[in-house]
Amino acid sequence: VHGPDVIRVEEPWLAGAGPRADAMVTRQPGIALGVITADCAPVLLVDPAARVIGAVHAGWRGAVAGVLEATVAAMAALGADPSRIQAAVGPCIRQPSYEVGADLRDAVLAAGPAARFFRDARPDHWRFDLAGYCAMRLHGVAGVEVRAVRGFHGAGEIYAGDHGEAAHDRRRAGQRRRRLGQPVPRQVGDADAQAHAGEARCRCEADPAGAA
């Protein structure tokens, strides 16, 4: 969808039967929220005290449109406190592989200061740090604590580089292909488990229970 809409989940639904949106929140015990991603960034959020969780499929369009901030606001409407929310930005396309043109760069920069998330590539092209941009939107705009997750190495302020993605686009090579025999990551969060642990975690599930 790549928009800012957020769904409040009260009960599970069958695969394909749910509303169309890139973000979900819930405070219902036992409900798992899941997102499927390839290039885009999976983001899990939790307020362990309020026992409220969120899951976001964050592409560049959605991030620019404010889906991350909208998710934080939806969690706050369920009783979460943004100052307590912890977020994990999961594996997504790496900056060295994400070559973009002026249209994408202009759209991102029009939404606010973000020049540091672009590196020069060939003429009139740049490499975009999607994970770092998502972390900045969460922390710098929404005031959320962004935690590192497995496969990331922090560098600088709020930068998540060196992703260990199971599938991504090789845009720099001008080819679109998948690594055969490897699943696209499905990022899953469970309200009880995350609230008990006090942090957002990403794990791969072949067939997670609850909403997806």
Image (tube, grey):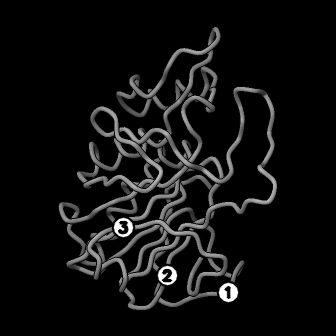
Query: Could you say whether the residue bearing mark 2 is in a helix, strand or loop?
Result: strand
Q: Quadrant of the N terminus?
A: bottom right
Left or right of 167 in this view: 46: left
Q: CB of mark 1 within 8 Å of CB of mark 2?
A: no
User: Number of callouts in the render?
Assistant: 3
Q: Which residue is mark 1?
A: 14
Q: Which residue is mark 2?
A: 32
Left or right of 85 in this view: 177: right
Query: Could you say whether the residue bearing mark 3 is in a helix, strand or loop?
Result: loop
The amino acid beneath tag 2 is: Ala
Tell me which numbered mark, 3 or 1, is placed earlier along the sequence: 1
Q: Is residue 80 depicted above or below 91 in this figure?
A: below
Left or right of 207 in this view: 187: left
Q: Which mark is residue 6?
A: none
Q: Which mark is residue 200?
A: 3
Query: Could you say whether the residue bearing mark 1 is in a helix, strand or loop?
Result: loop
Residue 191 percent across, percent down from the top left: 38, 82
Q: CA distance from mark 2 to mark 3?
A: 12 Å
Q: CA distance from mark 3 to mark 1?
A: 24 Å
Left or right of 127 in this view: 142: left
Quadrant of residue 141 within the rendered picture: top left
Residue 5 percent across, percent down from the top left: 50, 62
Residue 131 percent across, percent down from the top left: 46, 43
**In this orientation, which residue lies closer to the viewer: 154 or 127?**
154
Q: CA distance from mark 1 to mark 2?
A: 13 Å
The amino acid beneath tag 1 is: Leu
The amino acid beneath tag 3 is: Ala
Q: Is residue 37 depicted above or below 190 in this figure?
A: above
